[in-house]
Image: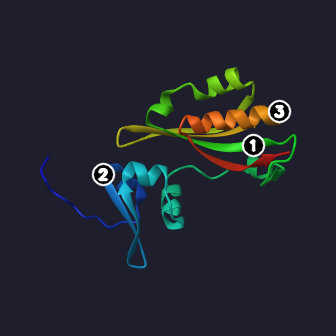
């Protein structure tokens, strides 16, 4: 509106999130990542950016989940523990309901969070899927088809 650019340097990611349109992350005097607030906050690429973003988002695993007997690879009969990222329109779609009905899997929602960045809804769900191996694989393929970003935390025995 005013055709102004303001450069702000801060470590306070909450401030950045509230007032900025674009962000650049600088480490050791070099820009290591830059983009829109939505891109940076919903899909950080570097370890430093992930650390900054995680400082204001609740992405830490709860203690009860850390205590679960978890494997990094699928073992027959185990259940995937997934973090699902919903951005924009997908945040308002009945993805979990469809997943349960259409793919005959059970979904245990362990942690949920919904926020807004630049007037765009952004949410995360930490879920455990239960079902037969084939059903789990097709259910996870469905989630990818819905353009959700999926992070496999591990497999619970």
Q: Earlier in the sequence, mark 1 or mark 3?
A: 1
Q: Which mark is residue 132?
A: 3
Measuring 63% from the left and 23% from the top, which residue is drawn there? 98
| Residue closest to the eye, 14 or 104 | 104
Q: Nearer the viewer, mark 1 or mark 3?
A: 3
Q: Which colour scheme is used?
A: rainbow
Q: Residue 19 carries which label?
A: 2
- Percent of width and height locating residue 81: 72, 44
Q: Which of marks 3 and 2 is in front?
A: 3
- Percent of width and height locating residue 64: 76, 47
Q: Which class describes the residues within 10 Å of circle 1: few (<14), some (14-19), or many (20+)?
A: many
The residue where tag 1 is placed is 80
Measuring 45% from the left and 32% from the top, which residue is drawn there? 89
- Give left or right: position of 91 versus 112: left
Distance from the alpha carbon under mark 3 to that under mark 2:
46 Å
Q: Which of marks 2 and 1 is nearer the N terminus?
A: 2
Q: In this rendering, is residue 91 above or below 97?
A: below
Distance from the alpha carbon under mark 2 to that under mark 1:
37 Å
């Amino acid at each position: 509106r005013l055709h102004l650019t303001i450069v702000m340097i801060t470590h306070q990611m909450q401030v950045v999130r509230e007032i900025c349109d674009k962000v650049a992350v600088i480490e050791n005097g070099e820009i290591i990542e830059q983009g829109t607030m939505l891109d940076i906050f919903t899909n950080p690429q570097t370890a430093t950016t992930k650390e900054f973003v995680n400082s204001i988002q609740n992405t830490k695993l709860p203690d009860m989940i850390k205590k679960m007997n978890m494997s990094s690879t699928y073992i027959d009969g185990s259940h995937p523990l997934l973090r699902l990222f919903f951005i924009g329109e997908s945040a308002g779609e009945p993805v979990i309901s469809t997943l349960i009905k259409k793919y005959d899997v059970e979904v245990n929602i362990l942690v949920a969070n919904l926020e807004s960045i630049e007037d765009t809804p952004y949410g995360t769900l930490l879920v455990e899927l239960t079902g037969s191996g084939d059903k789990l694989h097709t259910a996870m393929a469905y989630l990818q088809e819905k353009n959700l970003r999926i992070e496999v935390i591990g497999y619970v025995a």
